[in-house]
Structures are given as C-alpha cells and as structure tokens.
Amino acid sequence: MPSASTSATATASPGARSASRSSIWRRFSRRCWSTTTFRNLALACAAATLAACGPAAPKFHATDLTGADYARDFALTDHSGRPRTLADYRGKVVSVFFGYTQCPDVCPTNLSTMKRVLEILGPQAARVQVLFITVDPERDTRELLAQYVPAFHPSFVGLYADPARTAETAKQFKVFYQKQPGATPQTYTVDHSAGTYVYDPQGRLRLYVRHGETAEAIAHDIQRLLEGE
C-alpha cells in the first residue's frame, strides 16, 4: 500500500494541467494586448506631435513680405493729373507694377492677368486698386498713360513722374530698369523687373507676386487680404 506522503506528491490530473495552462495563456494574452495597445497609442501620439510641430501650409501663393522695410510709399502723379500717394488708396488691396506702355509682352500680360483677377473677385473687385508706374517717363506722357492703362480695365490707374523721381521711386521699391538701344533714339526698349507688389487695406506691404502667376492664385491671395489675413 502506498504511503500517505506518496499520495500527497502525486502528479496532477490532466484536467488540472489544462486549467492551469489556460489561466497562464489568458494572463499572457492580456499582457500582450496591453503592450500592443500601449505601443500603438504611443505611436499615434508621436505622429500627432510631429504633425503639430511640422511646417504649416503657406497662407499665400505669392511671397510673403510682411514687415519689409522698403516699398512703403510713393509720391507720383496719376493719369488724370492728380498727385497720388499710397495713402490715397487706404481701405483697398493695392497692386503696384512697374512697366511702360511700349512694353511688348510682360506689361500687357500683367495687366491682362489683373483684369482677370478682378473678374474672379466679382463684387469684391471694388475693393482692389491696380496701379501701373511707368519706368519710361520720356515717352509715357499723362495722355498716353490715360489711353493705355484704363484700356485693360476702367479702374486701373497709371502713375508717372519726372526721370529723377522715377529713379528714386524705383530704388525705394527695389525695382530694376534700364534702356536698351533700338534702331532709332525713340525706338528703345526698357528692361525692367516684372513682379508685382501687393498691399493690404491698411497700406502695409504684404506680398510679392512673380510674373507668370495665375489669376486664380492672385485672386486667392487678394481675397485673404480682404478678409483681414
């Protein structure tokens, strides 16, 4: 007959072993699920943090010049003969472009694009002023500007000055221009900067639009300025 001590140390039954393994598996599964869940949550938080710290989408298509210390004002004469400064157009978004009436391509393209911008803006176009400053004061008289500039849109304004004031204004606006000789003294062309400055309704320089930008992109940027961006 087996002794009592032998009975006490007998091997557990198959049912008991199965229950023990099931309990261990449940504890292991819970531990693995908790670890996986924690890892996924940590990765999600890290991704959210990186997204928050990443660069924000640009507000404008054009180059943002907010805070620039140049191109702040001008003192010129419009094609109606009235003295003008930037303050005269306070309350409107103002675009300023330097060109000349005999320009073969860049200037008419720019003015045509701005006409399209006003069409896109619809009723809001009344809050936009397009200014065209000539870099050819010798040939671009008040009368010629009065014919040329409003031909693109009745609200467009041509501005001019004598050669010295023109040069000073271009310098203040960091605009380059230079005569290129033609076949005769009066058939010269003028190389010049082709970008456009844009001011918000408070008269602050905000944007630089590169030549070739689409009317849709410019209208988008102007709309944001009109909304107080």
Image: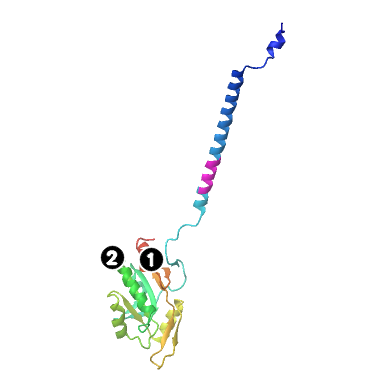
Total tally of numbered discs in the picture: 2
Residue 75 in view, yes or no? no
**Label whose residue precedes the other's in the sequence (2 or 1):** 2
Which residue is label 1 attached to?
217
Q: Is residue 3 above or below residue 38?
A: above
Left or right: 119, with 188 as reference point: left
**Mark 1 closeness class: few <14, some 14–19, many ≥20 residues within 10 Å:** some
- SS of the residue at dot 1? helix
Q: Is disc 2 in contact with disc 1, using a CB cutoff of under 8 Å?
A: no
**Mark 2 closeness class: few <14, some 14–19, many ≥20 residues within 10 Å:** few
Left or right: 187, with 27 as reference point: left
Q: Amino acid at mark 2?
A: Gly
Pinpoint residue 63: horizontal percent, then vertical percent. 45, 67
By secondary structure, the bulk of the magenta-drawn segment is best described as helix
- What residue appears at the point 40 percent right and 74 percent down from the top-left corner? 73
Point out the stretch of residues depicted in magenta: 39-47
